[in-house]
Image: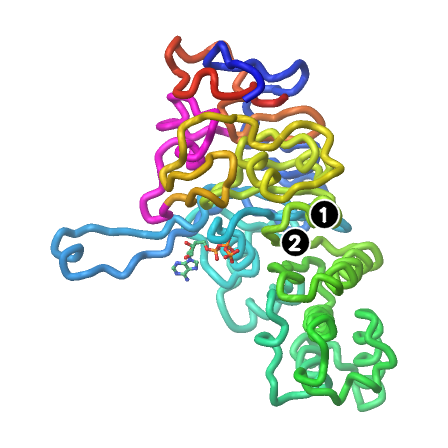
Amino acid sequence: MSEERSEEHPAPPPGRAAGPAGPTSGTGTGTGTGTGTDESVVLEAEGVSKHFPVRRGARALLGGERRAVHAVDDVSLRLRRGSVTALVGESGSGKSTVARLLAQLHPATAGEIRLDGRPVRAGRGRAFRAYCRHVQLIFQDPFASLNPVHTVRYHLTRALRIHGRAGSGAAELEKALAALLERVQLTPASRYLDAFPHELSGGQRQRVAIARAMAADPRVLLADEPVSMLDVSIRLGVLNLLRDLKERLDLAILYITHDIASARYFADETLVMYAGRMVEGGDSETVTQRPAHPYTRLLLASAPDPDRVTGSSGDGGTGEGGEGGGDPADPSASEPPSLISPPDGCRFHPRCPLAMERCRDRTPPRFDLDGGQWAACWLYDTSPDVPAPGDARTAGTGRGAAS
Ligand SMILES: Nc1ncnc2c1ncn2[C@@H]1O[C@H](COP(=O)(O)OP(=O)(O)OP(=O)(O)O)[C@@H](O)[C@H]1O
């Protein structure tokens, strides 16, 4: 602990907090919940939630209890043409569920997903295929996503045919296949077309999976941990490929990762998720170098970055431990909450070294900060409705919010 907090409602530094972000107050980085008048926005989610019902035991059935996993709650985001948006958070925070909602693989419990400003409810069959022409999803395990008994040629031909891009005749198909492999830098195509997945390296397999997604000529690519199963030495090559596709094809990419350091390198914008909710967003450099939300700070503290300029290493010091116990400055040392009965108020409050009384029962809205950054954290509330003395649960436990 380096500095006593003498008041329960620490004032953010000048110019940082700009009050709550209302439902239509988009941020400079487009991670707010605006109305889609911005033409660069291709795909957006507004107020989207997904609750998975928990199978009920006999006792619960008799008691009429209805329980659900609150995997995603009130999530809003915008994916823009020619831009990578990273979605970072610990395991189980709801990142994959967001991707699956955007891919229309799950129906949303609440909220709306819009493609080009129009609400989508893709359903199945032809409507779903039409949606997939625009929005493609790739997974972390390329070995599992490719059928081991089929060649690269089979996988890519099938995808081209499904999306009506196989041309007419063998020569056109061959040309389309070669173009796809060239796009993912697997050349000469003849070397890869008749290979089976097990004959390729992990990086090559992921490139084939990306080529298959590109067969649809999509405008949005949802990449769920695309490099986490690859050797560290080849991760950069695959991320560089995705960046190249973004630039050359003007793709909107959602990059899901638990590695916030890679978000800084690869993503234009970064969104941070905790226990089913978005807690912070902004341009990647700002979010990773000047994190505003205590959770983002703790996440960064567990992924040291020598370039980081501001103190962000969970400097809350001696606050109370989280529900799971352990060192509150280390997110890996305490457990995220149960999503079946998540904590009231801010879901991070049981682990937060800077938690105040109202964090326990009032869900913080998004507060706009400088330069398009925002944080869903009461520390940034500059409204005159300051809490009564005694609001702080952990007064004197750390620095102000945005040191
Ligand atoms: N089909 C499902 N049925 C029930 N619960 C689910 C289902 N899919 C996900 N969940 C639950 O929703 C929560 C969020 O899961 P999700 O996979 O979206 O998190 P994540 O951040 O992507 O985690 P990871 O990085 O480990 O993949 C978890 O508690 C998970 O168990």
How far is the residue under mark 2 from the one under mark 1?
Answer: 7 Å
Q: Using the image, determine if residue 53 lies above or below residue 38.
A: below
Which residues are drawn in magenta?
A: 338-365
110 lies left or right of 57:
right
- Would you say the beta carbon of the disc 1 residue lies within 8 angstroms of ligand 1? no
Q: Residue 115: image x %, image y %?
A: 62, 53
Q: Residue 34: image x %, image y %?
A: 61, 36
Asked whether the viewer can see residue 34, the reply is no
Principal secondary structure, stretch drawn in magenta:
loop
Q: Quadrant of ligand 1?
A: bottom left
Q: Residue 289: image x %, image y %?
A: 70, 34
For mark 1, what is the residue?
267
**Three-letter residue code for mark 2:** Tyr
Q: Which mark is residue 22?
A: none
| Magenta span contains residue 175 | no
299 lies left or right of 232:
left
Q: Using the image, determine if residue 124 lies above or below residue 87.
A: below
Q: Residue at x 59, y 75 (%)?
A: 145
Q: Nearer the viewer, residue 302 or 222?
A: 302
Q: Residue at x 64, y 25 (%)?
A: 369
134 lies left or right of 347:
right
Q: Tell me if label 2 and label 1 are in contact, CB under 8 Å.
A: yes
Q: Callout 2: helix, strand or loop?
A: strand
Q: Using the image, determine if residue 367 lies above or below residue 43.
A: above
